[in-house]
Image (cartoon, helix red, strand yellow):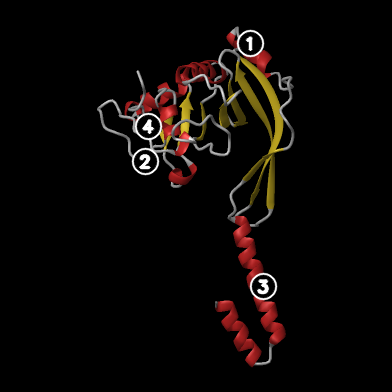
């Protein structure tokens, strides 16, 4: 609106060239600002390979005496815009896929400092999920071997996974439906989705609400045993309160 008003004024003064220049400059600034504020884009560059080129599986076996997971790797990248210069920044990643040999639950994740950033958790065959208890057992092994065993701080990721296939039930795609679970005091949840509830019931994940949690899902964090103890001693968070929906 403001650009058009300025354009009309310049045309009345006979400065069409200046008007076009001003409009173009303004458009470029708006475009640069929009590009700079675009969310980071994550994409895979290769398919997952059957063999573990990273050596993670062998490392887990050496440290833990066992490796409960079959490890695959793929290459990926994250593209983002610098908020000040609007220049494109590209970060290359090695993404791991750890499939629990017992249950078929798959964890896709990449390294970020001393943490694992979870990209996806899904069944090998989404049409034949093994259920809550099998998933909890696989997550427990993930924590023991890939967090505690490797000395990591925590794993984290968003709970929303609507773009991945899931076995449908009477709710259809049940993941984004309202959850009706009760906490340890008997109070029903408010605002939680069924997928959030699935994770929180395990007692292995703690929620961290972000500003966009309602549309993008709650940020879920799986602390290692060491890191959880550090948080308890520091009094940084009330873990029992955060784990109030855990199923025992």
Give me the C-alpha separation between circle 1 and circle 4. Answer: 33 Å
Above or below — where is 30 with respect to 238?
below
Q: Nearer the viewer, residue 181 or 140?
A: 181
Which residue is disc 3 drawn over? 25
Q: Do the residues labelled 4 and 2 touch (CB within 8 Å)?
A: no
Which residue is disc 1 drawn over? 61
Residue 68 placement (x, y as % from top left): 59, 13
Above or below — where is 32 with respect to 162?
below
Which label's residue is closer to the chain start, 4 or 2?
Answer: 2
Q: Which of 132 and 79 is in front in this view?
A: 132
Mark 4: few, some, or many residues within 10 Å (few <14, many ≥20)? few
Give me the C-alpha separation between circle 3 and circle 4. Answer: 49 Å
Mark 3: few, some, or many residues within 10 Å (few <14, many ≥20)? few
Q: Which of marks 1 and 4 is in front?
A: 1
Give me the C-alpha separation between circle 3 and circle 2. Answer: 44 Å
- Residue at image coords 64%, 92%: 13
Mark 1: few, some, or many residues within 10 Å (few <14, many ≥20)? some
Which label's residue is closer to the chain start, 3 or 4?
Answer: 3
């Amino acid at each position: 609106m403001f650009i058009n008003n300025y354009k009309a004024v310049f045309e009345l003064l006979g400065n069409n060239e200046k008007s076009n220049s001003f409009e173009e400059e303004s458009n470029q600034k708006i475009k640069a600002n929009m590009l700079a504020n675009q969310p980071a884009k994550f994409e895979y560059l290769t398919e997952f390979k059957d063999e573990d080129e990273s050596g993670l599986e062998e490392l887990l076996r050496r440290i833990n005496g066992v490796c409960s997971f079959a490890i695959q790797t793929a290459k990926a990248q994250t593209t983002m815009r610098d908020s000040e210069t609007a220049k494109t920044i590209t970060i290359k990643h090695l993404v791991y896929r750890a499939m629990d040999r017992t249950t078929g639950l798959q964890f896709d994740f990449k390294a970020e400092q001393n943490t694992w950033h979870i990209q996806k958790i899904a069944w090998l065959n989404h049409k034949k999920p093994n259920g809550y208890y099998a998933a909890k057992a696989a997550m427990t092994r993930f924590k023991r071997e890939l967090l505690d065993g490797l000395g990591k701080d925590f794993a984290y990721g968003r709970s929303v996974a609507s773009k991945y296939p899931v076995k449908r039930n009477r709710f259809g795609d049940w993941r984004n439906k309202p959850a009706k679970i009760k906490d340890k005091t008997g109070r029903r949840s408010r605002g939680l989705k069924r997928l959030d509830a699935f994770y929180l019931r395990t007692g292995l994940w703690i929620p961290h609400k972000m500003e966009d949690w309602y549309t993008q899902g709650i940020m879920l964090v799986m602390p290692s045993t060491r890191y959880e103890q550090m948080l308890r001693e520091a009094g940084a968070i009330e873990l029992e309160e955060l784990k109030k929906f855990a199923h025992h």
